[in-house]
Image (tube, rainbow, N blue to C red):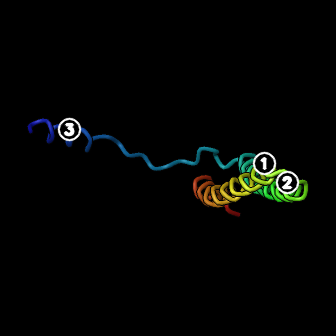
Amino acid sequence: MHTLPSVLSVLADVPNPAPADPTGGSNGISLLLSYVKWGALIGCAIAALASGGLMAVGKLSNRPGTAEMGKSAFIWSLGGVIVTAMAIPLVNTVFGAAN
């Protein structure tokens, strides 16, 4: 019981510095992050289109395994879009890259 007040007093003395921009305002980092964000979205779009092709080829050629692989890839590409769409505002907020 006596350790709790001493732990709290030690934690109260820990400094809490203000956040600092890790990039130092570098335009190169912002440009790189922009390319990565757009690249992730484009990659998800290409995966969605390719999975649609896999479903069509699998259905037309009577290959259920290929059609199933296309369905699975489509679900994962939609999941990738959702994760990317949630990550972009986070990156914009952290790095101040929202222009």
Name the disc covering residue 58, or none.
2
Marks 3 and 2, how far apart in space? Answer: 64 Å
At numbered mark 1, what does the secondary structure look like: helix, strand or loop?
helix
Q: Which residue is mark 1?
A: 65
The disc, 1 or 3, on the residue closer to the chain's N-terminal end is: 3
Q: Residues within 10 Å of mark 1 (few under 14, many from 20)?
A: few
Asked whether disc 2 touches disc 1, contact meaning CB atoms under 8 Å apart, the reply is yes
Q: Amino acid at mark 2?
A: Gly
For mark 3, give the secondary structure: helix
Q: Report the front residue among 48 and 69.
A: 69
Amino acid type assigned to the residue bearing label 3 in the image:
Val
The amino acid sitting under disc 1 is: Gly
Instruction: Measure the C-alpha gap from mark 1 to mark 3.
Output: 60 Å
Q: Nearer the viewer, residue 55 or 84?
A: 55
Q: Nearer the viewer, residue 67 or 3?
A: 67
Q: Which of marks 1 and 2 precedes in the sequence?
A: 2
Label at residue 7: 3
Quadrant hosting residue 80: bottom right
**Left or right of residue 90: residue 13:** left
Q: Quadrant of the N terminus?
A: top left
